[in-house]
Every structure is written in C-alpha cells, then in structure tokens.
Amino acid sequence: MKIAVVASSDRSFIQFFLPNYNFNDLPIGFEGSPFIGTLINSLLKDNNEVFAITITKAINNDYTIKKYNYKNFTWLVVPCRPFSIRNNGKKVGRIIDLYRYEITQLKNAILEVSPDFVHAHWSYEFAGAAIKCKLPYLITVHDNSWKIFCYFRNLYRFGKFLMSEIYLRRALFTSTVSPYMFPYLKSRCKEVKIIPNPTPIKINENQLQKLIKDKSNTLVTAKIVMINNGWDKRKNGFFGLQVFKKIKQKLPLASLHLFGHGTEINGLAWQDVQKLQLQDVFFYGSLKHVDVENHLVDAHLLIHPSQEESFGVVLIEAMSYGVPTVGGSKSGAVPWVINNEQLLADCNNLIDFSNKVEYLLLNQYIYESISNTCYQNVVNRFSDKAVYEKYIIYYLEILKYFKSAK
C-alpha cells in the first residue's frame, strides 16, 4: 500500500531512512516528534511504500518542495513562511490566514504522490491538507488546542485553536493517543479511536536485568534526567529544579541532566539554576533523538513535572529502558501512561513529589521492582508492534468506508 504520513518529521530520525544522503545535506524539517519515525519504520517493515510529508521554514525565499528518496521511502519537505505574524516579503504571516499557503502546498505534495491512504498528525495544517485531498485519511490528534491556548494566550495559539476547531469538525475519521483526550475529540469528531503513541523496544530481558542491577548498585550517585519541550509554566521545569534541590539534601552526589528547548547554556533553565544556586546540573539543549536516548539508557530516574500532557512520549521512551519515571498524578494522560501509583505525585506539592523520588532512590529492592514494572508496562501497551497493529486495523476499516462511499 502507498501511504502518506503527513506530520512533523526532521532529519534527526529521517536520515535513518535515507542512508544515501549526508545528514548536513538534508533540510532540518519539523523538529520534535521521533515517534513518527517509529511509525514510518513499522510501515516500511510491513512492505508499504511510504511518503513522509512535512514542512520546514523557507530559506532565502526558496519555496520549492524538496524531495529525497531511498528504495520505498520518500521524504517531501514543503517550505513554509518563516514568520507566523510578521509579513514574509509579499506573503502575510502564516497564522494570519491560518496556514492557507502551507495547506495548499501540502495538499499539492500529497496529490503528487497519489497515495492509497493519508495518515495526518495533529489537527492543524497537516490535518487540513489531508481532509482537502479527499483521499482515504486518518487524523491522529496529539494535543488539546484549547488547553494549550489557555497556557499560552497569544495570537499564534489562538489561530492554531481556530484551525483545530475547523478541521476536527470536518474530520470523518480520527484517533487520539489517550483516554484523557477522548472526550475532547468525541465532542467534535464523528469517529474516534484511542491508539497510543509507540516506541521501539530496543533491549531484551537479559539486557534489562543487567542495566537494572548496575543502576541499583549506584543509586547514591543517581543520574536524574528531565526532558522538556519548552521551559514554561505548562512543562513546570522550575518545579523540577526545586525537587532536585530537595533531593540533594539526602543524595548529595546525585546529578540532574536537562534536555530540550530552553535547557541550553545561558537559556531559561540555566538562569533558574543560578537563582536556586544548584550544583551538579548539566545542560544539553536540543539534541538529536538518538543522543537523548543514549543518556536515557544509563539514567537512574526520569522526573516529569509537566502540568498537562495529552500523552508524553518521553515517559514510554524512558520506561522502555527500565528507567522509573515520576510524573504528575493530575497531569492529563500521565497517570494512564505511567500506570503505577508509586510513580505518581502532585506537581504542585514539592514534598509529595520529592518523597516519591527519594523513596525510589533510597530503596534498592523497590527500585529494581519498579524498574521491571516500567519496562513491562511499555512492552505490553506501547511497543511499536502493538501500536502498529491497531493502526493497520483502523486503516483497513477506513479504506472500506471510502470504497463503499464511491
């Protein structure tokens, strides 16, 4: 089957599918969603022909669509206007006309490859293009645009909210990534299924047990990781720093490793660390996904103090390596994903959150037991194989509908 995956995709994981190109010769793409690569890989392993279609900011007013191919995989990169509100030469800011230009270009790219099926992600420009092509399609919704607007009350987010409302009410078939998101979608869409985000399982049971044993013997020097896609009130990174400061009272040799936008040297996280006078904090900023994974493998613990998540891919990525993950008990989909009361805490209560972390790091037996539970949780519920099978069943159901509607 010819399948177009219309979503954010960037060269950090797309290069894996394009070994005939040098990394620096590929455009940046649209950063931030490595699980799209997991889905693409599953589609290719099942002998589908895959077209990954994304957008990236135009450079030097070059709006030509770029195409890269290797075997049965093609990456199409559609340039978008660099500025969302300011004018882009003779073009208005992209949010001013609700991405009209980008949606038209995406639509043209989809129609050019003429796929049998279109799988678009998020409820914005990618969804709009998929719907307008009038081909069999599925829209997977990863966030609640109204919730996000409530956290970021600006013109850009209001425009995104309007786009989402327009396209969700037109969508025939949608899926979303957690039960937390289901009521939001069901009130707007005709057909909704819950299909979670996937992650590949890269270590087996024997490798897992060795990792857990090595870490449980070195808890006194715990490597704690926090991965934030933005340093803001929603992601609650400052609270995470406060948790670490309290942990250092009982585990003075522990270290904190920060990843994601805002965690670079001299960035927002760095400024907050100076205010709190914290030691043993390391700043990595935005790294390639594979580099972040390399840090997760030897991490003792992930803390995720986000106030709201529609899913939380980083949670399952960490747990797939047996890394215990402490997250918010009221943070949207986080409790459903983590699925363990011992790892859930109040993201507004420093004592509660810190106690959960200390309980794990100060009890070797408990640490080993929960590490195993985390791994099994991901294998049973979020593995790439399990999620892909759910998508294929839904694809076939949608194709059947479109065929009968002709």
Image (tube, rainbow, N blue to C red):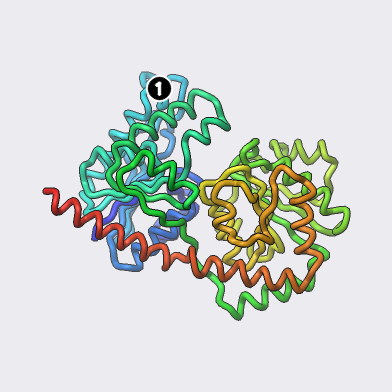
Crowding near pointer 1: few (<14 within 10 Å), some, many (20+)? some
The picture quadrant where one finds residue 293 is bottom right
Q: Residue 45 at x, y = what percent?
A: 35, 68
The picture quadrant where one finds residue 384 is bottom left
Q: Nearer the viewer, residue 47 or 147?
A: 147
Q: Residue at x 34, y 43 (%)?
A: 66
Quarter of the N terminus within the rendering: bottom left
Q: With 278 as the anchor, is 379 left or right in this view?
A: left
Q: Nearer the viewer, residue 150 or 60?
A: 150
Residue at the far left in the pictured view: 406
Q: Is residue 295 above or below residue 402?
A: below
Q: Residue at x 32, y 34 (%)?
A: 103
Q: Residue at x 40, y 43 (%)?
A: 185
Residue linked to disc 1: 96
Q: Is residue 48 above or below residue 157?
A: below
Of the residues shown, which amino acid type is indicated by label 1? Ile
Q: Nearer the viewer, residue 57 or 135?
A: 135
Q: Residue 219 at x, y = what percent?
A: 79, 66
